[in-house]
Image (cartoon, rainbow, N blue to C red):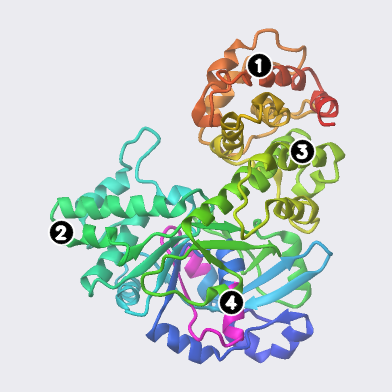
Amino acid sequence: MKLTLDGVRADRAAFEAAGYSLPSFDYETVKKNTQEKPFWIHFGAGNIFRAFQANVMQNLLNKGILDTGLIAAEGYDYEIIEKSNRPHDNLTILATLKADNTVEKTVVGSIMESLILDSKNETEYSRLKEIFAAPTLQMASFTITEKGYAITDAKGNILPAIAADFEKGPASPDSYLGKVVSLLYHRFVSGQQPIAMVSMDNCSHNGDKLKAAVLAFADAWCERGLANQDFASYVRDTSKVSFPWSMIDKITPRPDAKVEAMLAADGIEELDPVITSKNTYIAPFVNAEECEYLVIEDAFPNGRPALDKGGIIFTDRETVDKVEKMKVCTCLNPLHTTLAIYGCLLGYTLISEEMKNPLLKKMVETIGYVEGLPVVVNPGILDPKEFIDQVVNVRIPNPFMPDTPQRIATDTSQKLAIRFGETIKAYEKNPSLNVADLKLIPLVFAGWLRYLMAVDDEGKPFTPSADPLLEAASAYVKDYQLSDAPKDLSGLDKLLSNEKVFGVDLTAIGMAETVKHYFTELSSGVGAVKRTLEKYVK
């Protein structure tokens, strides 16, 4: 059986006999509607998009609620479209890995068209311009990672590619953002049609990040006389262009070899993953957990599709913010980071396996329920306690989710301030709470320092995950050895007082000494990590 339109049509009975749910809508009609009256284009057609948004669309198409499909575009790694999407006619197999040891298999076919966002490719770019000129287009959405919205480097300097596009104007930009804003400019000159520009990336206030980037281009081009002076006003007019905030939550690990083998055993051919020249790992299938949330600010100046009938929640900006903070600062992300740090130290390769360790399970439960929950603002549409219940009892322990602590440990220095610092700040602001009562959050910070030593609890070296501050942060612990407890820890003070890393000055609030005390114990020889957890996680 082949994962192509002809393959599914020819072997439909075989697919169904093997337990696959297939598209049941009239494909040709939906494709025609999509070409003639597009309403949703998505940039960044990666795993979460194919596992979540595309599947929601398929369900709505199958039910007849919608009759127009999705358009996917890729502006960074063109080989994703050339070597994965198009050879399979934009079809994807979604393997939903459930906690009850079952796998739900779906052939997702809601993507009707996939395009390369390349201003030098006349055919592809002309089609994208045609889409952006369409009065029916309601939404352009994005999962291009938080880094994708960057205009400047860490020192505040305009990135070279962005600076070059500022000078070029909208005719033929090269940067991802430049190309997107060029398309938006084409929509402007084609009648100033309204549109929602919706970031769906997993970062705080994502709509503002996208808006800031778009405005930077609009202002630069207008100031240089490279665009109509009214373009900057158009982008700022919320009745024309909106930048809603959103919160997305669905764990979609890298396509797993075990899932590939399972699908191959069903008779599916040509499932080999593709590793592009830009080192993107993409496969014709995605594996994901069942749980999913997408909450979007209801700000759509050209109307919005009935995605709420597919489980997507539309609400006001304040509620999106509350949900995002609930997830990122308390109910999920801090627990993941805790397990990532200690999982690497204790030699785990699966997050789910860590939850079989009573100490680690108790640690994340305490951080979530005891230390974090008291300062969570209930967003109303999702209950924080129930959210944590699902995380610690169903989602993280799911033995069929091939997610690793090493993956989640990526960019830890960029995550600590939000995932733990916001809780500490809330304790400081609340007169009925005491920062000194936080016992396990500082143990996470100490665990990160111990992790920076790049030696596990058995004394074996390991390679820390990629992190922009890895080299600089590791320098603070380079003189400490995994042997006798270090005597002088004053060399850590500068790092522990860094508010950008921890969200607060740990020295100023009196937490630094606790962190250093924990670090001393975590570093006192082989097996010290386990002994320290046994001592403090009660």
Mark sitting earlier along the chain (2/4):
2
Give the residue pinned by disc 3. Answer: 366
Q: Is residue 479 visible?
A: yes
Residue 517 on image: x %, y %: 71, 17
Where is residue 117, by image quadrant? Answer: bottom left
Residue at the outermost top position = 487
| Gap between marks 1 and 2 measured at Cα | 56 Å
Residue at coordinates 69% horizontally, 88% vertically from top-left?
Answer: 11
Relative placement, left or right, of 330 versus 205 is right
Q: Position of residue 223 (x, y in %)?
A: 16, 50
Q: Which residue is mark 1?
A: 513
Q: Nearer the viewer, residue 424 or 533?
A: 424
Q: Which quadrant would residue 341 be assigned to in this image?
A: top right
Q: Is residue 71 magenta?
A: yes
Residue assigned mark 2 = 229
- For marks 2 and 3, give the CA distance: 55 Å
Q: Secondary structure at mark 3?
A: helix
Give the residue at x 55% y 65%: 49
User: Given the image, on which type of amino acid does mark 2 rest?
Assistant: Gln
Three-letter amino acid code at disc 3? Thr
At horizontal 82% and vertical 39% (from top left) the residue drawn is 362
Task: Name the secondary structure under disc 2.
Answer: loop
For the residues carrying marks 1 and 4, which lies nearer the camera in this image? Answer: 4
In the rendered structure, which disc, 1 or 3, sits on the residue that comes first in sequence?
Answer: 3
State the SS at label 4: helix
For the residues labelled 2 and 4, say whether their Cβ atoms are less than 8 Å apart.
Answer: no
- The residue most toward the left is 225
Q: Amino acid at mark 4?
A: Lys
